[in-house]
Image: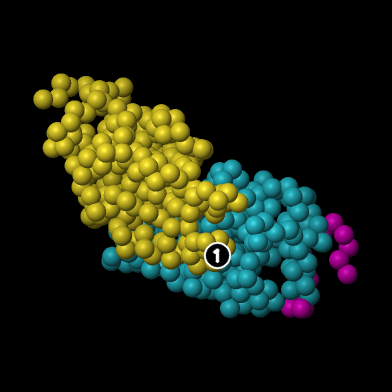
Chain colours: A cyan, B yellow
Amino acid sequence: MSKETKAIVLLSGGLDSAVTLWWAKRKGWRLYTITFNYYQRHRREVDSAEKLTKAADVVEHKVIDVQYLKEIADSTLLKEASLNIEIKDRPGIYVPARNTVFYGIAASWAETIEARWIIGGHNRMDFKQFPDSTPEYFSLFNRLLRIGTWIGRKRPIRILTPLSKMNKVQIVRLGLKVGVPFELTWSCYMGRERACGSCQACRIRLNAFEKAGVKDLVEYELPIP
Amino acid sequence: MSKETKAIVLLSGGLDSAVTLWWAKRKGWRLYTITFNYYQRHRREVDSAEKLTKAADVVEHKVIDVQYLKEIADSTLLKEASLNIEIKDRPGIYVPARNTVFYGIAASWAETIEARWIIGGHNRMDFKQFPDSTPEYFSLFNRLLRIGTWIGRKRPIRILTPLSKMNKVQIVRLGLKVGVPFELTWSCYMGRERACGSCQACRIRLNAFEKAGVKDLVEYELPIP
């Protein structure tokens, strides 16, 4: 086994996961990335993820097809419906048990390559909408990986969420510090050629860049004030 | 939401999961089944699973393709190699973090259809080889589902493992009691037309039937004494 520390970063292609990847890069870890392809409109994000992995010089990048989520899970994120509605008293953009599946798959790879860390870009604004992104959730998941894998007995895999106490402005600032090529990231919920500038994700992103005092170099459809 | 209790059974097509399915059927629950297709040689098992769902009259059966496990996880179960070797100090037939992925996917479906139970056929002989099949593991997983899903706040999904204290003979006896059509199940590690009768899975199965005092109606390649 290599003496170097390996880290698997869950990379959506969005801003948060890109900052997470460069944060891990600065640690000097050997980087492995995993992107889940499960939402047709986000093909754009999958492309962004690939560009980011090249820029970050990762050892290996995997795109895992989990389109079956569309068939078994109800979420507006997986359908063409509006993103701001609720389904069964939960936010429409929540995908049932999504992170349990994603971190399970990442753990499978981590145990295989004997990675030390699995890293996700969940931030403190996610907690309210996604119960599978809270510190309590990841703390339990780490215990599950310790007792539920063979490698856990000698060298447990641990999930890290370095952005979990940050808001979007702080994440942009950290990204500037660690040198993220923001122009390669993709946040827009629409999968069009340029970002729409008006969906919830675009608005949060633009607001964060504005507050951080930097220009967002991603191309937008509308002129951004 | 239906007032009826829904249960999702993880159905491999093998003996244990078939007994689990009929056990759940006897409870009067509305049955949903999920089979994971991840191992070419076990196409035979996937077919058995389908026959079992028809015999058990399940409401809905899903076959989920998780072939990516072959790409990210090392296990002799996923390769053509011998099944009795060890990889990195763990049993060769262990698939890294497999149940975390499988129960995550089942949980995604369970939250969507508002199922009350997810049921797996793990038995007490599995514990030694599969750390992701122990009572401690499922106890933690249930806590994860309680805090990590939206439905967990009002009506938690719970994983049940009714065979967890049983050995194979006891499982065969329970199967007889609940009326499992054993001839539709498939245990052999080989994916040939008839069961080989000599792999580890066949030997354990045949031994259990013998001790339970019943004839196994599955067809074998060799005459079974």
Number of numbered discs overlaid on the protein picture: 1
* Residue at the farthest left position: B225
Q: Main secondary structure of the magenta part?
A: loop
Q: Nearer the viewer, residue A174 or B84?
A: B84
Residue located 51% across and 38% down the image = B59
Mark 1: give few (<14), some (14-19) or many (20+) Cα within 10 Å.
few
In reply to whether residue A215 is colored magenta, the answer given is yes
- What residue is rendered at 63% in x and 59% in y? A94
Q: Tell me if B63 is positioned left or right of A11 in this view.
A: left
Q: Is residue B63 above or below residue B109?
A: above
Q: Which residue is drawn at 24% across and 25% down?
A: B217
Instruction: Where is residue B50? Give x, y as percent.
Output: 43, 31
- Residue tagged 1: B154
Where are the magenta residues, as a range? A211-225
> Which residue lies at the image location 74% right of the left edge and 60% below the top edge?
A84
Give whichever of B3, A64 is nearer the camera.
B3
